[in-house]
Amino acid sequence: MTSADHHGSIGGRGRRMLVACLASIAAVACLGTPAFAGGGATQRTAKLQHALDQVVAAGAPGAVVVVRNGARTIRLSSGFGNLAPQTPMRVEDRSRIGGVTKSFTATVVLQLVGEKKLALDDTVERWLPGVLSNGDAISIRQLLNHTSGIYNYTSDPAYLAPYQGGDLTYVFDPRTGVQIAADHGPLFAPGSQLSYSNTNYILLGMIVEAATGNTIASELQARLFEPLRLRDTSFPTLSEIDGPHMRGYVFLDEGPFDVTAWSPSGAGAAGAIVSNADDVARFYRALLHGRLLSRALLKSMQTIDAVATGGVPDAGILGGGWGLGLLRESFPCGEAWGHDAENPGYMTAAWNSKNATRQVVVLVNSNYGHDEPVSRAMRELLTTAYCGH
């Protein structure tokens, strides 16, 4: 079933389930297919393949894992990248990586800080006068680590309504999202608490544009995509995904519903990037190796404010805390840095050791709540991949 098959025709109960599914986002087992295994088909590869297959056995259409340890990389896939017709998942398939976009946006912001075009203590009011009633009390740093107290516009029914109504290609201006957040008013005094908000990163994208005179898309392209040769990474504003890609699904009473066409327009600098597992790993490797930021700025990115700990339940591992566009998480074998994401039809997790000598990226082409079987299997896979057990 494709989105075209269902466009504007979701059944009543199905629509209610989709509404519930999407609201939670805003706050077929098959044999695995090894695509490449550095060093041959080892016991390690077999263990990883089994853990990956368990994600599919738990209910996901398909999944991909890329694991890197030093010079060795293992790339594996399982399940289907497309359910109609059934097409095996491929490790090179592109995916909507949602909130992982935030690490890319934050890197651009911090590069501008390094160039003295921005400062972490600059206020929202300084760059976007009149946009927020308390913009003079909110700093760029607080936008980056989600301590701004700004309402998350993607939780508002006004944002979700067109998509829940069946118009997945609806183009939503993220600046309208900022106005929605402004209308809600502040959740708490800036810097006093943690509250994940996509609005923070829409504002950061707008600040980048004000400081450079260029679009956030062009800055991402010039500063990250091109120099790192991220050939499978892009910042789309419309629903079409170029090149080989996995289709994204949510599951309703009627069965799997294809939401691949869900427009990335409203996600913008907070979540619009399309990429694949290898490109995501390459980006974090460059970032954590110190190729994109000075040592001091990378240290700032990995500094956790006392109030920026905890988080919201999602498919990832809870705990750790928020740096500046980077999450710190606790695995049984130690800390990891990166980001995870849960967006309509897709889940992404990208975790790295502090200097990225050890990396794991997992892509799944559906999304689930924190305690659902697929999410639990995904966490088991992440632990197996990152810790080797």
Image (tube, rainbow, N blue to C red):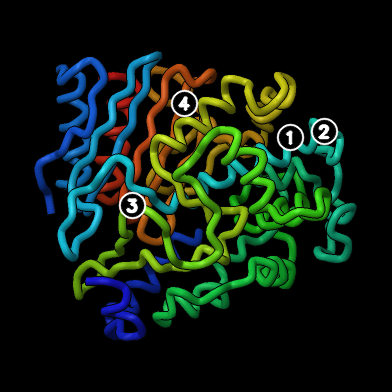
- Which of pointers 3 and 4 indicates the residue nearer the eye? 3
- Which of pointers 3 and 1 indicates the residue nearer the eye? 3
Closest to the observer, 240 or 183: 240
Q: Residue 265's x, y, as percent?
A: 56, 66
State the SS at label 4: strand
Q: Residue 382's x, y, as percent?
A: 33, 32
Give the CA separation, mark 4 to mark 1.
Answer: 21 Å
**Badges 3 and 4: C-beta atoms under 8 Å apart?**
no
Give the CA separation, mark 4 to mark 2.
Answer: 27 Å
Q: In which image quadrant can residue 225 be found? A: top right
* 42 on left or right of 119: left
Nearer the N terminus, badge 3 or badge 2?
2
Q: Which mark is residue 352?
A: 4
Give the CA separation, mark 3 to mark 2.
Answer: 36 Å
Nearer the N terminus, badge 3 or badge 4?
3
Residue under label 2, please give it. Answer: 115
Nearer the N terminus, badge 3 or badge 1?
1
Residue under label 1, please give it. Answer: 111
Q: Amino acid at mark 1?
A: Gln
Q: Amino acid at mark 2?
A: Glu
Q: Amino acid at mark 4?
A: Asn
